[in-house]
Image (cartoon, helix red, strand yellow):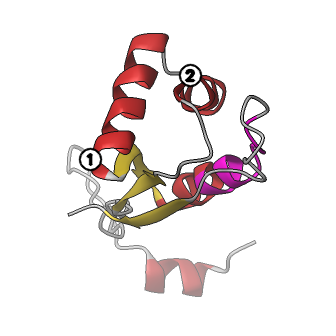
C-alpha cells in the first residue's frame, strides 16, 4: 500500500469536474529504414530462361517482368531487381547467389552475381 504521505506528495488533489492531466512521454515516431537496391549483374553463362525462372522463384515476378529484366541485364550489364529494406536486400542477394548454375549451359558453373547498394 502507498502511504498517505507518499500519496499526497505525488498526487495533487483534483476537484470535481476538473480535468485530470497526466504527464506522458511524447510519442516516438518509428525510424524508417533507408531502402536498398538489389542488383543483378550480367554474365555469359546464364540464359534468359534461367534469369526469368530465378526471378519468378525468388521474387514472384511473372514471365513478362522477368523477361524485361533479363533483356535489361543483358543490354546494360545490370538491372535493379528489387528495392527494399537492408535485411531483405541481404536475403535476396543471398538467394540469388544460392540459386545455382544454369543447367542448360555447360559453361555455367555457379549462380549469377548480385550486389546491393543504398537507393538514392
Residue 32 appears left or right of 57: left
- Residue at 54% of width from left, 77% of height from top? 7
Q: Quadrant of residue 69?
A: top left
Residue 19 vs residue 111, the one in the foreground: 111
- Give x and y (percent) for residue 102: 73, 37
Q: Secondary structure at mark 1?
A: loop
Q: Position of residue 2 (x, y in %)?
A: 68, 75
In the picture shown, does residue 3 fall above or below 77? Answer: below
Q: Nearer the viewer, residue 71 or 88?
A: 71
- Which residue is outermost to the front? 106
Residue in the foreground of this view, choosing between 43 and 97 = 43
Tell me if 5 is positioned left or right of 99 in this view: left
Q: Is residue 104 above or below residue 108?
A: above
Q: Quadrant of the N terminus?
A: bottom right
Q: Is residue 80 visible?
A: yes
Q: Is residue 59 visible?
A: no
The residue drawn where x is 59% and y is 60% is: 90
Q: Which mark is residue 60?
A: 2
**Relative to 119, 97 lies left or right:** right
Q: Quadrant of the C terminus?
A: bottom left
In the displayed structure, would residue 75 be above or below residue 32?
Answer: above
Residue 114 screen position, x and y as percent: 54, 57
Q: Which residues are magenta?
A: 93-102
Q: Alpha-carbon neighbours of circle 2 within 10 Å: few (<14), some, or many (≥20)?
A: few
The answer to the question of whether label 1 and label 2 lie on touching residues, with beta carbons closer than 8 A, is no
First-in-chain label (1 vs 2): 1
Under tag 2, what secondary structure? loop
Q: Residue at x 68, y 56 (%)?
A: 94
| Rendered image: mark on residue 16 | 1
From the image, state whether disc 1 or disc 2 is nearer to you.
2
- Tell me which residue sits at (21%, 43%) in the image: 17
Magenta residue check for 94: yes
Amino acid at each position: 500500500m502507498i502511504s498517505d504521505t507518499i500519496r499526497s506528495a505525488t498526487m495533487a488533489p483534483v476537484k470535481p469536474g476538473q480535468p485530470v492531466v497526466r504527464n506522458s512521454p511524447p510519442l516516438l515516431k518509428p525510424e524508417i529504414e533507408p531502402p536498398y537496391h538489389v542488383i543483378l549483374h550480367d554474365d555469359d553463362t546464364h540464359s534468359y530462361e534461367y534469369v526469368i525462372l530465378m526471378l519468378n522463384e525468388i521474387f514472384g515476378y511473372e514471365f513478362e517482368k522477368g523477361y524485361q529484366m533479363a533483356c535489361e541485364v543483358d543490354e546494360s550489364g545490370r538491372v535493379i531487381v528489387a528495392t527494399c529494406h537492408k535485411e531483405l536486400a541481404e536475403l535476396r542477394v543471398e538467394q540469388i547467389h544460392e540459386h545455382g548454375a544454369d543447367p542448360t549451359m555447360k559453361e555455367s558453373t555457379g549462380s549469377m552475381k548480385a550486389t546491393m547498394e543504398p537507393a538514392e
